[in-house]
Image (cartoon, helix red, strand yellow):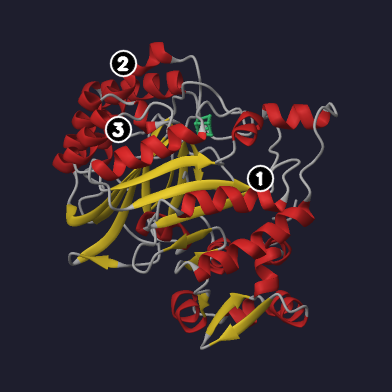
Amino acid sequence: MEPEGGGCYPRRMTSSISPVGEQARMAGGKPALALYLHIPFCSSKCGYCDFNSYEGLEHLVPEYTPALINELRLWSPAARAYHVDTVFFGGGTPSLTTLDDMSAIIAAVRDQYDIATDAEWTLEANPTELTRDHLEGLRALGINRLSMGVQSMRQAELELLEREHTPERVVQAVQDARAAGFDNMNLDLIFGLIGQRTEEWQESLERVLQFHPEHLSCYALTVEPGTALYYRVQKGQLPDPDPDVAAEEYEWTRERLAHAGYQQYEISNWAQPGRACRHNLVYWRAEPYLGFGAGAHSFFAGQRFANVDAPNRYEEAIAATVEARETTGSAAMQQIAGGETPDDATQQADTMILGLRLMEGVDLDGFAARFGVRAERAFADAIAKHTRLGLIEVVDGRLRLTSRGLLLSNEVFVDLLPDPPEE
Ligand code: SF4
């Protein structure tokens, strides 16, 4: 999963920024840091997908790994003050990367960064191409958590989503992953599909529960502008998803997974005890992370920034940055497309919106200690309104969404956004 970025204001970044600004969490005696590495290539583009991922760019793959390794080197001096305790390979389809390339990238991460011995190393995988040999190779390289894009266990729904795999392929991939030694697995599912009946969603989830995954991510389908699915809906070839069915399925999912022993720790994420995704918690707790690769976002040293999306432009920019560093000593990071230093109001809003996604909610005393103002005061109107509507509540000093608020979270979040700057 790639972190969503805020607004982008073009600004030249350098690697000489110092570590200040984010929510501090200590690891190994230093501030903790998460690393995200983006692999943007896919064997085909799924109809609903609006991630920064591309099919048909195989010719760019050979230069991508060296670019990623160079970018790891470029940032490592600035990251020396941090202890890295999560590394996440997202995409795209990281499981398409050859084992030789994965080995080189992981070696660069270990060489260049201070990595915790118990770090979480996650890799996103597509069931389509996963083989037992590849899985064993990944495990041997130190990947200790696998996140598989299952989406549905019904063939017709996989075809609607334009996924290439079948339910049988998922069964085989999960069995192979277990046999290869993966004992920490997330499976991604999508509910609220167009034309889906609640019983059909229940069938998919029940089949997936038979795998006893340690973690489940269940997202409602959203029809994102620019996707193939969006144009099919716009042209009237498909109806819009039914939000009432999605709400009913979500409610059922919460009850069913609680009954099966999973703890819901975020709006769309459930885990067996102790198996929450440590990497994604970094995003939701507004802690620092560095992103590498095409389109990767970062929140580092109090600044938010994002790399150029297009893989060819990313590769060219990294090569230019390395060359400029060697010839002129310039520290400018040319792969960065834009960024911002969020002001206090933006950071407070981020902390509220991201924190409310978590079941633990926002620690009100912690908020006051960090920002020097109480959330109850900074967001007085929004908190009063949504408490009155029964969408949020304070429990043991933490502000959190109610069960009803989980269904209507966007209505709360929109009222927490900072006012736009005056013209
Ligand atoms: S495999 Fe994942 S990243 Fe690639 S196109 Fe499909 S949904 Fe998008």
Q: Nearer the viewer, mark 2 or mark 1?
A: 1
Is residue 194 at all visible to an observer of this figure?
A: yes
Distance from label 1 to label 3 (Cα)?
34 Å
Type of amino acid under label 1: Leu
**Amino acid type at mark 2:** Pro
Identify residue for label 2.
Answer: 62
> Which residue bears the numbered disc 1?
221
Question: Picture quarter containing residue 101?
Answer: top left
The first of marks 2 and 3 along the sequence is 2
Residue drawn 76% across the image and 41% down it: 195
Label 2 crowd (10 A; few <14 / some 14-19 / many >=20)? few
Dot 3 crowding, Cα within 10 Å, few <14, some 14–19, many 20+: many
Query: Closer to the camera, 15 or 82?
Result: 82
Q: Is residue 138 left or right of residue 4?
A: left
Q: Secondary structure at mark 3?
A: helix
Q: Residue at x 27, y 47 (%)?
A: 182
Question: Does the residue at mark 1 contact the one at mark 3 (Cβ under 8 Å)?
Answer: no
Query: Distance from label 2 to label 1 (Cα)?
Result: 34 Å
Q: Earlier in the sequence, mark 2 or mark 1?
A: 2
Mark 1 or 3, which is nearer the eye?
1
Which is nearer the eye, 190 or 52?
190
Horizontally, is 60 left or right of 132 in the view? right
Residue 18 sits in quarter: bottom left
Point out residue 11 in the picture as x, y percentages from the top left corner.
49, 39
Residue tagged by mark 3? 71
Question: Residue 417 appears at what percent x and percent y?
Answer: 67, 62
- In front of the other: label 2 or label 3? 2
**Vertical position of residue 32 compared to residue 54: above or below:** below
**Which residue is at 65% across, 67% downward?**
406
Label 2's element? helix
Residue furthest to the right in view is: 236
